[in-house]
Image (cartoon, rainbow, N blue to C red):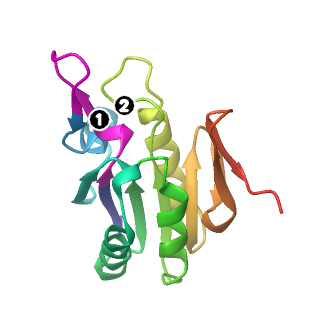
Amino acid sequence: MTLALICCGGTIDTVYTNDAGFHGIGEPAAVEAFVRAGVVAPTITSLIRKDSKDMDDADRASVVAAVHSCSATQVIVTHGTDTMAQTACAVASSIKEKTVVFVGAFLPAACKNSDADFNLGFALAAVQTLPAGVYIAMNGRLLPATAAVKNYAAGRFEMAKN
């Protein structure tokens, strides 16, 4: 398998402590999810540990560089959902020869009813079957990165309306 996993933080990696209201970005949740599922470990890079609202153009450039420089032709990028589409579009504008799937979660992987494991499994299947391009895989929806928008009211990603 020529698969790489690039982790950028976001809700999927959010952890809570006993301190009321305190949270932070922990270790990449995808690693444990893949171990639980018996997935052969891909190359893993913990690139950024930020809430995606705090990501800037320099962070997006780091993601583009990491995708470009990895030897894998299939890449999963875990990312917070608030700016996932922005980062995915930045990657799509410069990476053409790889299959890149962005994925995250609306609830942290550490939460009982999280969508994280489902989304990660969906992204893993997608990255292995799709042609080269950049996609967003969330909650059973697979969208081209350049056409995906987050619908905050509905709590999902969907196709942008022209």
**Residue positioned 31% across, 55% down in the render:** 8
Against 32, is 73 above or below?
A: below
Screen quadrant of the C terminus: bottom right
- Inspect the image, locate mark 2, and give the three-letter code of the amino acid beneath it: Pro
Q: Earlier in the sequence, mark 2 or mark 1?
A: 1
Assess whether mark 1 and mark 2 are in contact (beta carbons under 8 angstroms). Answer: yes
Image quadrant containing the N terminus: bottom left
Can you tell which quarter of the image residue 154 is in?
top right
**Is-magenta flag for residue 13?**
yes
Q: Which residues are magenta?
A: 8-23
What residue is shown with label 1? 14
**Quarter location, residue 26:** top left
Between 78 and 83, the one nearer to me in the picture:
83
Give how far across and how far down residue 89 sits, in percent: 55, 70
The verdict on residue 145 being magenta is no
Look at the picture and state if 110 lies above or below 158. above
Amino acid bearing label 1 = Thr
What residue did someone put label 2 on? 108
